[in-house]
Amino acid sequence: MKQPAFRLEPVLKLRRTEERAAALASAQAAREATEAAERAERDAAALTERALPGHPTGSALIAAMVASAAAAADVSAARALAVARAEQAELVRARWTAAAQRTKGLERLRERHVAALQEAADAAEERVVDDLVTRQHSTTRAREDETSREETTWTD
């Protein structure tokens, strides 16, 4: 006998697909956040290693200061980008967690469905066995009654 299918199976498959997609997006966002943080640290290290030219002239000093200010702005922008990417990665991870929870809820429903089907099948099997035992017992009892009647002779 065919068991009834879990009616929410298509939804469960969709949830699993959503969870996998969210996991991939989370991994990508985490990579991007890490890369942005590393880039910001490299830029900051390069800024601190800058040296003024030896025997600077006025225009060379001004050019070096402008370049340093531009590099500092780049470092600041890189750090801001790293923070934004980290926040984005956290949001994407939260979406992944939510997707995983939705999937887990449906999986628990499916497990309960399978357990209920198994319980029903076990109960049906037990009823069949009980019926067989009862039928066998009543048949045996009827034979014993017939045998005892045949053995009993009525004499007056």
Image (cartoon, rainbow, N blue to C red):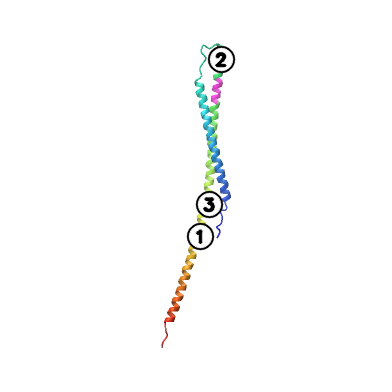
- Which residue has dot 2 on it? 62
- Which residue has dot 1 on it? 121
Membership of 71 in magenta stretch: yes
In the image, what residue occupies the spot 54% across and 46% down?
A: 103
Q: Secondary structure at mark 1?
A: helix
How many angstroms separate mark 1 from mark 2 (CA)? 87 Å
Ranked by sequence position, the earlier of labels 1 and 3 is 3
Where the N terminus falls, by quadrant? bottom right
In the image, residue 138 sits, relative to residue 88, either above or below, namely below
- Which residue has dot 3 on it? 110
Counting from the top left corner in percent of width and height, residue 101 is at: 52, 45
Counting from the top left corner in percent of width and height, residue 113 is at: 52, 54
Ranked by sequence position, the earlier of labels 1 and 2 is 2
Where the C terminus falls, by quadrant? bottom left
For the magenta stretch, what is the residue range? 69-76
How many angstroms separate mark 3 from mark 2 (CA)? 71 Å
Q: How many marks?
A: 3
In the image, what residue occupies the spot 44% across and 81% down?
A: 150
Q: Mark 3 belongs to which amino acid?
A: Arg
Q: Mark 2 belongs to which amino acid?
A: Ile
> Does residue 95 show up?
no
Magenta segment main secondary structure: helix
Counting from the top left corner in percent of width and height, residue 146 is at: 45, 78
Which residue is most to the left? 156
In the image, residue 57 sits, relative to residue 74, either above or below, namely above
Membership of 7 in magenta stretch: no
Ranked by sequence position, the earlier of labels 3 and 2 is 2
